[in-house]
Amino acid sequence: MEFDFFVSQHLYFGPGKLSRLPDLAGRYGRNLLLITGAGSFVNGPHWEPLQKGFDAAEIVVYTAQIQGEPGPDDIDEIVKRYKGRPVDVVAAVGGGSVLDAGKAVSAMLTREGSVTGFLEGVGTRTHDGRKVPFIAVPTTAGTGSEATKNAVISRTGETGFKKSLRHDNFMPDAALVDPELALGCPADITAACGMDALTQLLESLVSTKASPMTDALCTSGLQGFGTALQRCVLQDPEDLDGRSCLAYGAYLSGVTLANAGLGVVHGFASVIGGIKGMPHGKVCGTLLAAATRENITALMAQDPGHPALEKYARAGWILAGRTKEKDWASGCSLLMDLLDEWTNCFDMPKLGAFGITLAHIGPIADAAGQKNNPVHLSGNAMKKILEKRL
Ligand SMILES: [Fe+2]
């Protein structure tokens, strides 16, 4: 057994924990750069009490907003605006895109030049890991960015990319996970974010880099996740127990992806997000069931005793709320059927809705990475996944 393991230094989890942010920020200094989304948080019920908290703690708050998934220009502009000011700590309150933006800004405030130069597969510069301390406060249960060491930066278009700024030090110094912040989140966003977290838990569970640590955390994150997602999407967006379960699973999905890596669904997401700008959660949500089916089919054909099949089966039993039964094959079937059902009942959009056509299938299948996927899928299997969701 051999593995490395990284996790954020502090996690504050539970309803109402947002009120801890002023004190937490004050540990790093009096000057806070607060990054939020383009309106929903600052217009919501949590903003005013938080401002009072900052005043009481005598924190000077500079603000910046991010709309959509961050591009290099967004990061460069915020860094340019605040470089030279006494920023002691950066905090980001928002969805995965806002957290990634905050993470990148905290890393780039210490460096000269554009963030593009430091992106994996795009730039040629190496970041030394020095940054301004960073606190991540997710308002959706999805990417797990509050627990990861990379920030995803995108540029869309035919020459577009979706690449990471990554360093072990970029793990947030603190994650403050308050499930109340997701109450009332619209069904389509809850579904897309939840399916992203579910994809991350499943892909890191069966990853070639998985360890007993990540296996245990994936299993814990999957517990109750499916039923909580169904309740919050289909029945009651104000279900706090459900929101807590999703927030917990999403946080753990970040921990496990940072330590075990991901599979073919995220390989596709990296390419599709760059070309067509389809939101990350929707790419993962629409492809997860089809990709899992192809993975299981290929594993059964190549190596029916492969340990990833036992893990898929275990995931099926956990998500269905059943104890272990019969053989692996029945657990795998259960998982594939559940994922198909959720793809339909959560109304995951088809790829075609975002302008992807039959002509894109070949190039996307060729460009998508399969790093850490438990089995190598053939070109035909890769295309089959995309065609099924076209
Ligand atoms: Fe993801």
Image (cartoon, rainbow, N blue to C red):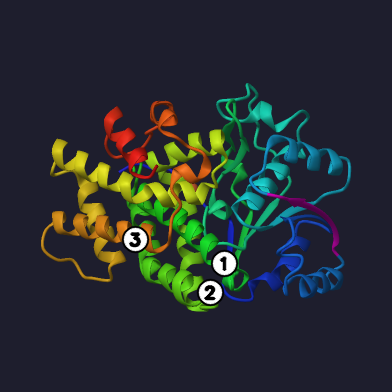
Residue 262 appearing in the image: no
Contact flag, marks 2 and 1 (Cβ < 8 Å):
yes
Please tell me the numbered disc located at residue 237.
2
Q: In this view, does 358 lie to the left or right of 184?
A: left
Does the residue tagged 3 have its C-beta within 8 Å of any atom of ligand 1? no
Q: Which mark is residue 123?
A: none
- On the image, the x and y values in percent for residue 134 come to 69, 52
Provide the residue span drawn in magenta.
59-67
Q: Main secondary structure of the magenta part?
A: strand
Q: Which amino acid does label 2 sit on?
A: Pro
Q: Mark 1 points at which residue?
A: 186
Spatial CA span between label 1 and label 3: 27 Å
Classed neighbour count for the residue bearing mark 1: other residues with Cα under 10 Å, few (<14), some (14–19), many (≥20): few
Front residue of this view, candidates 389 and 199: 389
* The quadrant where residue 334 appears: bottom left
Q: Give the amino acid at mark 1.
A: Pro
159 sits left or right of 390 in the view: right
State which quarter of the image contains the C terminus: top left
**Above or below — where is 12 with respect to 130?**
below
